[in-house]
Image (spheres, helix red, strand yellow):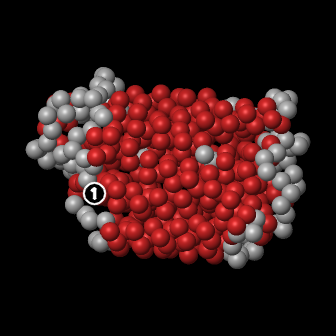
Amino acid sequence: MKQRPNLSFWSLWNLSFGFFGVQIAYALQSANISRIFATLGADPHDLSYFWILPPLMGILVQPIVGSLSDKTWTRFGRRIPYLFVGAAMAVLVMCLLPNAGSFGMTVGTAMIFGLVALMFLDTSINMAMQPFKMLVGDVVNERQKSLAYSIQSFLCNAGSLVGYVFPFFLTAIGITNKATKGVIPDTVIYSFYIGAAILILCVLYTTSKVKEMPPQEYAEYHGLKETDNASKANWFVLLKNAPSTFWKVGLVQFFSWFAFMYMWTYTNGTVAANCWNTTDVQSAGYQEAGNWVGVLFAIQAIGSVLWAMVLPQIKNRKFAYAFSLVLGGVGFAMTAFIHDPYIMFIPFLLIGCAWAAILAMPFTFITNALEGYGHMGAYLGLFNGTICIPQIIAALIGGVLLNLVGAVQSNMMIVAGIALFLGALSVTIIKEK
């Protein structure tokens, strides 16, 4: 098997730069979906159900994109065509979703419109996101994968930072953050418009700079026969033959993504109640809290960017992974007891440490373990199930757990912290290749 050469820093950067734009779209969705549907009239006990769609579309779309792209070769590449089509779809839907309450529809119709738009947004984001993980697995050698995924994590969190602060920034420059009942404020609508423009520009940059390997060259560098990826990928057979690392990292992923689902769902209610003393979704305080959630998520992204630079320097990857999750668990638990919006920065910096590890470490372990297996794209698509399934389960039982913890949204953040502690314990069973 030929050894893949080391790539320059800027080659690694170009490989993932489009992820910056994709993550802006994902950040806008993550920070604003609960706010959008609460503003449209959703009950807090039902908020977690709206979050079933993102992971559900992920578990359906990403294995398909992975399997198809393994067998695709065009003059534009294997992964890049899917990246470009997904980004183009996302741009269109980002211009529609925040307008769910602006077309004069009834509350029920606006909810349905919003759900359909969210479904297509999630489909397109997943279609655009998955190829970046595959490109690193395809092109980068084992020695540089930690660096490559850390760069990807950095760009991901930088994109998150930009997406999260858009509503707050637009409010600061005079765009109205208030709207009539059931209508999304202009700050959110314009944020989605700007994010869509940045997304397509970033993806165009990556597609113009990255040249993928042709099938024969790919097979030589990965120790495969040229027909290995061309053959039909039976997902059940692939899962049966998956390395044990696939399942062990998957267990850590379960607890990690279970926790972050509750952050996205209940941070808005937690901050509004703890720091603005309101649970009234129509109040000015609730919308101010919604903007502040974007700031807190941006602080989380800053923590992630800084921690992403530290992670490659820690030689023991398992320790780095587990320690990061423990820091995040402490951060989640702290949010339930803080009532000052600025002191909230501290737990979200800690949560950022966990997020940096979750974005980078699992794919380093998995792609190294998959060398020589073939069907890299299909395996990474299936591995996405370890991201989506815990989110679906968390969303389905969110309302039940909320009642069990006293119908207090901040208590759900403690539940998220406990989940991350369990994830850190699970890291101990991983065996590195």
Circle 1 — which element? helix
Residue ID for mark 1: 244
- For residue 314, what is the image quadrant? bottom left
Q: Is residue 5 above or below residue 272?
A: above
Give above or below for 243 relative to 185.
below
Is residue 424 visible in the rendered image? The answer is yes
| Residue at left offset 28%, top offset 71% | 315
Could you say which is closer to the camera, residue 45 or residue 354? 45
Please name whichever residue, 398 or 172, is drawn nearer the observer in this view of the structure.
398
Q: Residue furthest top?
A: 75
Image quadrant occupied by the C terminus: bottom left
Give the position of the N terminus as an image quadrant. Answer: top left
Q: Is residue 236 above or below residue 338?
A: above
Name the image quarter holding residue 115.
Answer: top right
Residue 296, how many percent across, how many down?
65, 62
254 left or right of 36? left
The reply to whether residue 11 is visible in this rendering is no
Residue in view at x 36 percent, y 59 percent: 249
Q: Position of residue 155 (x, y in %)?
A: 46, 51
Q: Amino acid at mark 1?
A: Ser
Question: Quadrant of the rendered structure where residue 374 is?
Answer: top left
Q: Residue at x 63, y 71 (%)?
A: 414
Residue 227 place in picture, x, y as percent: 18, 29
Characterize the local packing of mark 1: few (<14), some (14-19) or many (20 or more) Cα atoms within 10 angstroms: few
In this rendering, would 116 be left or right of 99? left
| Residue located at (57% from left, 70% from top) | 417
- x then y, percent, for residue 101: 80, 36
